[in-house]
Image: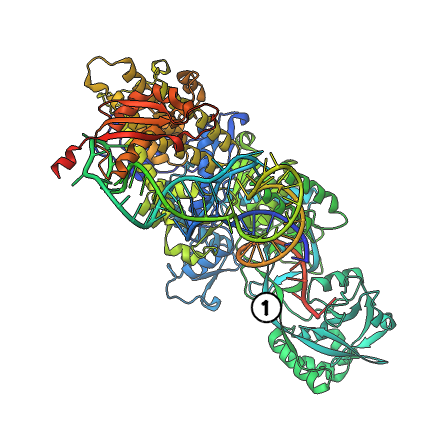
RNA sequence: GGGCGAUUGGCUCAGUGGUAGAGCGCCUCGUUCACACCGAGGAGGUCACUGGUUCGAACCCAGUAUCGCCCACCA
């Protein structure tokens, strides 16, 4: 929230300086998470400096996790990606605005509060300031609505806030343990007063500009939740059905149609075939009578009818599907609704079936059997009646069809006519086409990572078939900040909504009273009523940049963070969260809400299936982090590229753990050569040895390439480059130089020794910075041994001092030396002797082009290979011209004489 | 039906025109004083398939197959 909520720091941390300058005897990853989390909190390491200019800021529109759910490994995965980016940008000199939000608004919270406290929301009730819930903790209690006490919306929201505080504390704790470099001073809740005010203010501005409007129209309706739903919340699922071949009656004989929804027969308004369909030409312009109900309906032509579907002629009902809506609208058909909001057939006899209005008596009689039944029961009854009347041709043929479901629902959606609020999103043909073009253009401005994710945006925007329906007939959520005048006839005037001043927001029209009215006038003729609906949860989440950035309450902050730099999110909500945020920003600010969108992939379980929540919960994120260590789990996450699904792989975490431990140990080793603990010189001018220079030259290349990778949002590449070089550094370079770095214990430090020590220091300093975004704990631990401050506030490495130290050294020389060392190791390995076994004499054959190079490092190779006598280097390939020869493959030991290691002597 | 990804050693994945790579696993060896949560060495792949372009293809083009996902599909 932009109204800052100070975060309490649970336990005072030890002064960070206590450990500075001392390399411990024994290193460990255990306990680093808690220790450094405390130190970072106390040190304000990730605090956002709100005096920074916009150009220096890197702002992130963090996805707010749903707090009434639980975090699973997928969250850990994608939030790590964001944190890696945040840490890189921070080290690159940007002031990172990285808030955390909690999505505690919406159906999941609503349901949880109902069960937990045994209440339900009734917006018609007045607020009770002294309310105490009937129960606390829902285990084993009834979840039936009848057993839940009705309370006012405000009381309900208070309970939501009370319950979500608990969840949010737990979530924050996990994020801290994972090492997210969030500035916890900046966190927000989608249920908070500020978020509600932002959502209402944005809506009022949409309304004032004509972008929000109300319409009475057929729309998708969930009968379980009894609310309208938006196109973005649809999910097509397989649903069993059956084709029923049904006869309509024409003068010339029966006309057969096929339908999977015979219960809609009473709602039929026309039969429709394709204009070019020869079979039905003679019927166009005539009328037929519906079976059972005897309603006279026209036979019409429309190009949307598909000749090869079913019988080729369709029965158009109001409303069975979206095609019906299209026909109804374009052919101006009457409305004959028979399905109510509860999913049952309406109880009152529809006018066109009433006997006293001229309908056949049998029609009304049959209707009386159907009234109030579910669609399922009605279908059975209609089919029975059709069979009895002989209008069912043959038996129903089972089929599997696709039906639209609300993504959270389990019954197919019906189409119900209702008054709803919409926001323009380019989904409508005539007035919306221009907006659609603009929004598609925004899509091309936005940098998607990876780029191919853009097509999901384009597909969605291009395929919209209506504006964004934002009203929901639910109780918990952000209410529409409007009232309607009630006329003398007692009917609300929806065309002249009464709106509050922006300064009065947030309002709840079910309890607040508009200016110029008194509370007593609520619902009275000549008075007012509040809009009963709430906004879709996406109507609030589409404003996260505005909520987190202080659009309403902190314009100074907003100025510095908006438009934001990054929106990280999952690919599944491009059509919802990403798109709706673009719509709001485009309408309100005339800009994109952010410059970049980083799309994380799915976590797949070992069977290559999307990891389900239930499976994810078996392995809790906390357990995972505690078992492997946060750096290890972060390593696993960071090893997966953006937009790519990743396997949940414990093996990768073990590798990460090994890497983190190696960082600790190798650092300790590199820091202890001087004998004076962490006193390692970082002076590039001390580096004189060819091998040291080559190592630093290679490292400078790694810095350049890793930086390019991070700039391109390719953290995986950056990590891989760093990691590979680090292992070469450990396995070859450290081995090669350790004797020289020890300096034989001489009091006077030779130039060669000083060179090795300076190179080690420079390399370590650089590699810690390179690893810091992925392994924040291990790198910070090492940093604290010998450097001041936090590595996470240190500058991203600069290749310049490395290049200065390297001079014109060829980075390939380290590989040459490594190959020479490997050849000596191989001799011992094949002889099955200890690596400690001395080599009394050897001849090293190398490619002709590498003779000089090996010669320049032969001292270090001799030491590392424990060659006590002569080590001659000769050209393996007489004659030049093999410039491309692979040193690694061609470097072999020709003649060798092994000594005996003390170990073997003892054995 | 339209689209987007993917297909490389047992596993997880790099590799976008120049003689196939990494890690894990596996095999062999090594108690080395940074690290046994270790080290060294080794085996292991006709890069899904079929054509084409090219001096040369894992990589470019066309097509096919399989897997995953998005959109459309309710008569």
Subunit of label 1: A
Under circle 1, the secondary element is strand
**Where residue A304 sits in the image (x, y, percent)?**
77, 62
Residue extending farthest to the bottom is A388
Residue placed under numbered mark 1 in the picture = A239
Q: How many marks?
A: 1
**Where residue B65 sits in the image (x, y, percent)?**
59, 58
The residue at 52%/58% (across/down) is: A125
- Looking at the image, residue B9 sits to the left or right of residue A505; the answer is left
The residue at 71%/77% (across/down) is: A245
**Where residue A697 sits in the image (x, y, percent)?**
42, 22
Quadrant assignment, res A486: bottom right
- Can residue A735 be seen here? The reply is yes
Q: Is residue A482 above or below residue A761?
A: below
**Where residue A117 sits in the image (x, y, percent)?**
41, 59
- Looking at the image, residue A557 sits to the left or right of residue A305; the answer is left
Residue nearer the viewer, A31 or B19:
B19
Q: Which quarter shows the C terminus of chain A?
A: top left
Residue extending farthest to the front is A878
Say few, some or many: other residues with alpha carbon within 10 Å of mark 1 (under 14 / 14 to 19 / 20 or more).
Answer: some
| Colour scheme | rainbow
Q: Is residue A529 above or below residue A297?
A: above
- Can residue A506 be seen here? The reply is no
Q: Is residue A870 above or below residue A832?
A: above
Q: Is residue A353 above or below residue A438?
A: below
Quadrant assignment, res A790: top left
């Amino acid at each position: 929230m932009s109204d800052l909520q100070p975060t309490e720091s649970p336990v005072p941390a030890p002064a960070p300086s206590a450990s500075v300058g001392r390399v411990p005897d024994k290193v460990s990853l255990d306990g680093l998470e808690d220790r450094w989390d405390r130190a970072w909190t106390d040190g304000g390491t990730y605090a956002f400096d709100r005096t920074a200019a916009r150009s220096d800021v890197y702002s992130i529109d963090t996805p707010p996790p749903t707090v009434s759910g639980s975090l699973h490994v997928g969250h850990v995965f994608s939030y790590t990606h964001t944190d890696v980016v945040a840490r890189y940008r921070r080290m690159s000199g940007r002031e990172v605005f990285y808030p955390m939000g909690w999505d505690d608004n919406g159906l999941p919270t609503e349901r949880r509060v109902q069960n937990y406290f045994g209440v339900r929301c009734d917006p018609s009730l007045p607020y009770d300031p002294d309310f105490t819930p009937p129960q606390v903790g829902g285990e084993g209690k009834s979840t039936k609505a009848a057993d839940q006490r009705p309370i006012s919306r405000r009381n309900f929201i208070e309970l939501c806030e009370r319950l979500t505080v608990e969840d949010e504390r737990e979530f924050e704790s996990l994020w801290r343990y994972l090492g997210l470099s969030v500035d916890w001073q900046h966190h927000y809740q989608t249920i908070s007063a500020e978020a509600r005010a932002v959502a209402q203010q944005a809506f009022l501005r949409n309304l004032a500009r004509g972008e929000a409007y109300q319409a009475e129209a057929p729309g998708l309706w969930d009968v379980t939740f009894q609310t309208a739903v938006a196109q973005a919340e649809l999910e097509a699922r397989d649903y069993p059905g059956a084709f029923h071949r049904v006869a309509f009656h024409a003068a010339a004989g029966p006309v057969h149609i096929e339908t999977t929804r015979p219960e809609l027969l009473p709602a039929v308004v026309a039969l429709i075939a394709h204009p070019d369909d020869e079979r039905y030409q003679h019927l166009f312009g005539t009328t037929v009578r519906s079976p059972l109900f005897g309603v006279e309906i026209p036979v019409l032509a429309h190009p949307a009818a598909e000749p090869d579907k079913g019988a080729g002629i369709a029965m158009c009902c109001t409303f069975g599907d979206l095609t019906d809506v299209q026909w109804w609208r374009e052919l101006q058909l009457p409305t004959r609704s028979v399905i109510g909001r509860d999913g049952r057939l309406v109880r009152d006899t529809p006018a066109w079936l009433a006997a006293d209005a001229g309908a056949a008596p049998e029609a009304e009689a049959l209707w009386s059997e159907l009234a109030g039944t579910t669609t399922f029961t009605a279908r059975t009854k209609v089919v029975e009646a059709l069979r009895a009347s002989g209008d069912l041709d043959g038996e129903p043929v089972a089929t599997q069809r696709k039906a639209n479901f609300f993504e959270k629902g389990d019954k197919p959606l019906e189409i119900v006519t209702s008054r709803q609020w919409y926001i323009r999103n380019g989904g409508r043909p005539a007035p919306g086409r221009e907006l659609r073009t603009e929004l598609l253009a925004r899509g091309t401005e936005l940098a998607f990572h990876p780029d191919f994710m853009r097509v999901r945006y384009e597909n969605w925007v291009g395929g919209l078939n209506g504006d964004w329906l934002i009203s929901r007939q639910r109780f918990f959520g952000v209410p529409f900040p409007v009232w309607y005048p009630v006329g003398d006839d007692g009917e609300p005037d929806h065309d002249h909504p009464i709106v509050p001043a922006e300064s009065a927001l947030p309002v709840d029209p079910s309890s607040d009273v508009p200016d110029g009215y008194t509370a007593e006038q609520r619902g009275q003729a000549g008075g007012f009523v509040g809009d009963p609906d709430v906004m879709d949860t996406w109507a609030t989440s589409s404003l996260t940049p505005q909520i987190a950035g202080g659009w309403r309450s902190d314009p100074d902050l907003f100025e510095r963070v908006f438009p934001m730099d990054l929106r990280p999110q999952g690919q599944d909500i491009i059509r919802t969260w990403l798109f709706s945020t673009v719509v709001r920003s485009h309408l309100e600010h005339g800009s994109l809400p952010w410059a970049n969108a980083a799309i994380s992939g799915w976590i797949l379980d070992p069977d290559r299936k999307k990891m389900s929540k239930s499976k994810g919960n078996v392995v809790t994120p906390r357990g995972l982090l505690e078992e492997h260590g946060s750096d290890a789990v972060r390593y696993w996450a960071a090893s997966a590229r953006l937009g790519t699904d990743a396997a949940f792989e414990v093996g990768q975490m073990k590798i990460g753990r090994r890497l983190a431990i190696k960082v600790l140990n190798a650092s300790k080793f590199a820091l202890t050569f001087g004998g004076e603990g962490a006193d390692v010189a970082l002076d590039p001018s001390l580096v004189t040895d060819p091998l040291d220079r080559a190592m630093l030259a290679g490292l400078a290349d790694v810095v350049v390439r890793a930086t390019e990778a991070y700039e391109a949002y390719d953290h995986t590449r950056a990590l891989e480059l760093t990691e590979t070089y680090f292992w070469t550094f450990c396995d070859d370079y450290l081995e090669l130089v350790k004797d020289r770095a020890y300096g034989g214990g001489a009091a006077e430090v030779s130039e060669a020794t000083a060179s090795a020590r300076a190179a080690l220091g420079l390399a370590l300093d650089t590699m810690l910075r390179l690893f810091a975004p992925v392994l924040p704990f291990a790198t910070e631990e090492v940093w604290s041994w010998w450097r001041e401050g936090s590595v996470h506030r240190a500058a991203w490495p600069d290749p310049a001092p490395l290049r200065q130290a390297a001079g014109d050294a060829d980075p390939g020389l380290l590989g040459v030396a490594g190959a020479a060392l490997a050849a000596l190791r191989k001799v011992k390995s094949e002889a099955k002797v200890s690596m400690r076994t001395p080599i009394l004499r050897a001849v090293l054959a190398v490619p002709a082009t590498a003779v000089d190079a090996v010669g320049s490092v032969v001292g270090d190779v001799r030491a590392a290979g424990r060659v006590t006598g002569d080590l001659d280097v000769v050209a393996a390939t007489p004659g030049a011209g093999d410039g491309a020869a692979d040193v690694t493959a061609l470097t072999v030991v020709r003649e060798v004489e092994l000594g005996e290691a003390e170990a073997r002597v003892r054995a």
